[in-house]
């Protein structure tokens, strides 16, 4: 991922785009979706095992948790990658390596979608439900 982030940052810089804010938000989004991939199946497991599928979610509380997590991730990414200059160290480390621009752009577009689908798919396989017109009983 470090190589990918470094090359994406270089591409943002070449386009005279706001490279620092763009890479901060992109990395934050990737980490948020990874958190989603872990927390969604985990919450369903906890609901099934400890609450017998009777756990209900308050929309306000859920929204507060989601936006707080996103804010904390953006702050953390900014502190680590920008303030501590990790992204610049990564660019320097990988300056001699190349990634095909088509591959970089494709990966940039598809990675968030893949991460969202992975979390939802794992949840359906664990809990059960319908996916692509197929009914799954679920492992739990």
Image: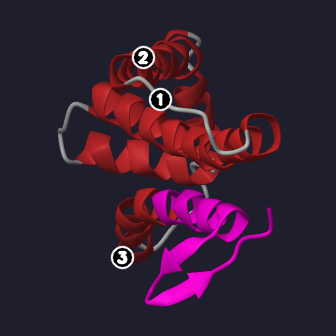
- Residue bounds of the magenta highlight: 115-140
**Which one is closest to the eye, mark 1 or mark 3?**
1
Is 57 placed above or below 76 here?
A: below
Is 118 included in the stretch rendered in magenta? Answer: yes
Pointer 1 residue: 57
Residue 133: percent from left, percent from top: 44, 90
| Quadrant position of residue 125 | bottom right
Residue at disc 2, secondary structure: helix
Q: Does the magenta segment cover residue 120?
A: yes
**Residue sitting nearer the eye, 123 or 2:** 123
Q: Nearer the viewer, residue 79 or 28?
A: 28
Vertical side of 139 occupied by 134: above or below: below
Q: Which residue is mark 2?
A: 61
Between marks 3 and 2 in the image, the one whose residue lies nearer the viewer: 2
Q: Alpha-carbon distance for marks 3 and 2? A: 41 Å
- Left or right of 11: which side holds 48? right
| Quadrant in the picture for the C terminus | bottom right
Q: Nearer the viewer, residue 50 or 97?
A: 50
The crowd level at tag 1 (other Cα within 10 Å; few <14, some 14-19, many 20+) is: few
Residue at 64% over, 39% down = 39
- First in sequence: mark 1 or mark 3? 1
Q: Residue 42, located in which quarter of the rendered image?
A: top right
Q: Which numbered dot is residue 70?
A: none
* Image marks 2 and 1: residues in contact by CB distance under 8 Å: yes
Q: How is the image coloured?
A: secondary structure
């Amino acid at each position: 991922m470090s190589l990918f982030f470094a090359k994406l940052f270089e591409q943002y810089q070449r386009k005279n785009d706001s490279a620092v804010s763009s890479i901060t938000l992109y990395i934050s989004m990737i980490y948020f979706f990874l958190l989603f991939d872990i927390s969604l199946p985990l919450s369903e497991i906890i609901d099934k095992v400890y609450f017998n599928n009777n756990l209900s979610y308050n929309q306000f509380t859920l929204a507060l948790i989601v936006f707080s997590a996103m804010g904390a991730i953006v702050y953390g990414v900014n502190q680590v990658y920008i303030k501590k200059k990790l992204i610049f160290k990564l660019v320097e480390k990988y300056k001699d390596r190349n990634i095909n621009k088509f591959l970089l752009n494709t990966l940039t577009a598809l990675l968030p979608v893949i991460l969202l689908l992975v979390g939802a798919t794992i949840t359906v396989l664990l809990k059960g439900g319908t996916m692509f017109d197929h009914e799954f009983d679920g492992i739990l």
